[in-house]
Amino acid sequence: MAEQSMASSHPRSLGASSIFRWFMGIISFGLLAYMLVNVAYQMIVPPPAHRLVFVQDIPLPSGLGAVSPGQKDPLAPGVEQQFDHFDFQTLDPGTHRLFIAHTGPSPDLLNLAHIKFDLKTDGHIAVFDTNQDKLIARIPIPQVAGIVDAPDLHKVYAADAEESIVYSIDVKTLKFKPIELGDDEGPDAVGYDPVEHKIFVSDVGTPADPKKTLNAARTNQNVAVIDALTDTLITKINIGNLPKLPRELAPTTQPGNVPTFGYDVGHNKYDDVLHRVFVTTQILHNADDPNPVALPPPGTGELVSIDAVTNTIADRLVLPVTCSTPHGMAIDTQQEVAFIACTDFDSDRNLVENLLRVDLKSMKVIPTDPMKTRLAGGADIVLIDQRFHVLFVGCKGGISVFDEKAGEFHKLGDYVLGKGTHTIAIDEETQYLYLPLNTGGRPTLRIVKYNPNGI
């Protein structure tokens, strides 16, 4: 009986095995067919384009000297220098000329590395014609940081951070003249008020004797005001000696409740609706602190409102602890909202670089989860394309892009287009973005195009 049972079960075993093989075969052929169809689809249907599309690279001269090393042509492509750097840009719509601050090697970093440099040949302004896609000139102004266009006056203003001079440049002839700010002002960001015809300059201050202290005097932490019609200095609005506000916990203070080390003075922007100039500030920590990554005291970043007519401080807003060292800023005057890049990060404090929004009419922060507005590393310049209501933040680690339309604010993504893309300019007619950087050991102007239908 046992033999009969075994014999009778054998055909059933073969049947089950055969069905399993057929089943696996169908699955295998199905997977193969799916893969072939998928590959064919990818070959026939191109993938969706990126939101930022590479257009071309334009070689730029070296950041040193009247000519690039080894070249006789001052516009010839050059090589990257040690500690080379680009800063602000501005586009003049009338001439289609883009002015690029190529600061050259940073004097502070050269000094730390004990490398000698000649200030007079360190850096320049590169002038690029966006119609011809061609570099047309270099202006021999060294160590330029902030730069702004005054289109109605046919001038560009550029801040020489090392010599505390703001230069007035004729956009057509490219001739320039200096406007002295005084010693140790360290001008950085520059803004323009086309109604009062004033230039506002954020002076961060520089140490008078770096061998004794790296802290700048509070009297040099100012917003300088220049009459753009006469190119003369009108006044300086002191920021460094402002008393701390009640919510701020500065670690040490001086008489009058003034923070001992004063304030960092960030970017400033003019609002033509409110007729105010807004500037980001931050209570400073001791620059002589041996800890190289020490952060400023938490909850001491501010947005300061300045009356552009009277040149006086009108209001101050303490920013949340999630915004440490507010720096770059852009204003959407249709919504009356300021977008501020908060640039510090600390994993122990759960602090990240993020984009903060402020309602300028009420001077109140718009609640936002900083994790949802997190920026690529090294955030700096903030720009808005008014046509598409898209906001760009130039970061060393990429370009962070946001949809900033009213009621639809959200992040679109981070886009890596090279190393050190912290400075950015945009032509709203063409949606071309200009990103000067060093790539492959050479200074380069990288041009990309914004694609509203990209991903």
Image: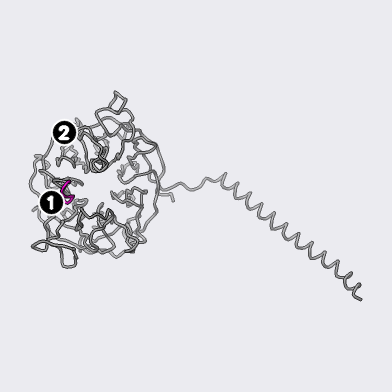
Residue 328 position (above or below residue 110): below
User: Which residue, as the protein is rendered here, is positioned at the far top?
Assistant: 72
Which disc, if any, is residue 217? 1
Residue 153 position (above or below residue 240): above
Which disc, if any, is residue 176? 2
* Residue 241 position within the rendered picture, expressed as x and y whole percent measured from the top left: 11, 57
Q: Splitting the image into 4 quarters, where does residue 138 fall?
A: top left
- Is residue 74 among the parts visible in the rendering? yes
Residue 185 position (above or below residue 7): above
Mark 1 residue element: loop
* Residue 242 position within the rendered picture, expressed as x and y whole percent measured from the top left: 12, 59
Count the labels in the image. Answer: 2
- Is residue 222 among the parts visible in the rendering? no
* Secondary structure predominantly adopted by residues drawn in magenta: loop
- Location of the N terminus (image quadrant): bottom right
Marks 2/1: CA distance? Answer: 29 Å
- In this picture, residue 262 sits left or right of residue 136: left
Q: Splitting the image into 4 quarters, where does residue 231 fall?
A: top left
Residue 247 position (above or below residue 375): below
Say which of marks 2 and 1 sits in front: 1
- Residue displayed at 19% across by 39% down: 156
Residue type at the position of mark 2:
Phe
Q: Residues within 10 Å of mark 2 (few under 14, many from 20)?
A: some
Q: Nearer the viewer, residue 79 or 189?
A: 79
Which disc, if any, is residue 372? none
Q: Which residues are drawn in magenta? A: 210-220
- Residue displayed at 14% across by 58% down: 260
* Residue 16 position within the rendered picture, expressed as x and y whole percent measured from the top left: 79, 65
Residue 38 part of the magenta-drawn span: no
- In this picture, residue 47 sits left or right of residue 151: right
